[in-house]
Image (cartoon, rainbow, N blue to C red):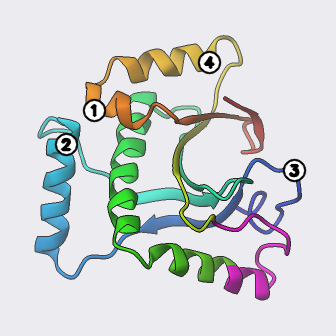
Amino acid sequence: MRRYGHGWSSGDPLVVIDSEAQIGYGSRDQRDAADAEIREQLQLSPSETIPRKLDALGVLPGGELALVEVKDTQGIIDRAIIQAAAHLVRYSRLLALGNVRDTIQAMIDQKTAAGLIPRGCPRLDDTPRIVPCIAAPVDPSDWPSNWRRAIEKRHPQIRVLLRDVLLVRLDPAGSILDVR
């Protein structure tokens, strides 16, 4: 968070604007209904937990909204795939409601004014495309192919949702080494 938030510099692949982001609901019933819709849309088994907390919310240089799921060296790519797809559904629905883009941009402006992220960082496009991202420190040999094969094994709806996923290889300290 710090490296690509407070430590962001021109040329970085994204600016991170929030971590552990969660969407609030008016009631537990509304949240549970949203979870049930996601479970049905993604064809998840009852044993698969529906994620509610996004690891990082960011903005890509082109103004796209980046939804980043981060795994450590012990992380499971199959879980990251479910998380990325579920968050994409949640944030797509939220953006479709209208004023969320302005709320997120206001948060960026506020953090910039407070010096929490540097001036000149990317701004959200007027109608930002949402880009799911999966990031993890992995062995460099054939990692994008391995991750894409894992996505291809999932339900067709998940494969469609993640067709534009950004795969991000990190070093053990969390710096971005490669983006595919």
Could you tell me which secondary element the residue under label 4 belongs to? helix
Of 177 and 43, nearer the camera is 43
Q: Answer left or right for 153 relative to 168.
A: left
> Magenta segment range?
109-124
> Mark 1 against mark 4, which lies toward the viewer?
1
Kind of residue at disc 2: Gln
Sooner in the amino-acid sequence: mark 1 or mark 4: 4
Query: Where in the figure is residue 73, as x and y percent of width and height?
Result: 59, 32
**Residue 120: mark:** none
111 magenta-colored: yes
Mark 2 — residue? 41
Mark 1 — residue? 157
Kind of residue at disc 1: Gln
Q: Answer left or right for 92 relative to 11.
A: left
Kind of residue at disc 4: Trp
Q: Main secondary structure of the magenta part?
A: loop
Residue 125: quadrant of the picture: bottom right
**Residue 11: mark:** 3
Whole-number angstrom distance, CA of label 1 to CA of label 4: 23 Å
Tell me what residue is drawn at x 71 percent, y 53 percent.
62
Whole-number angstrom distance, CA of label 3 to CA of label 1: 33 Å
Tell me what residue is drawn at x 19 percent, y 61 percent.
34
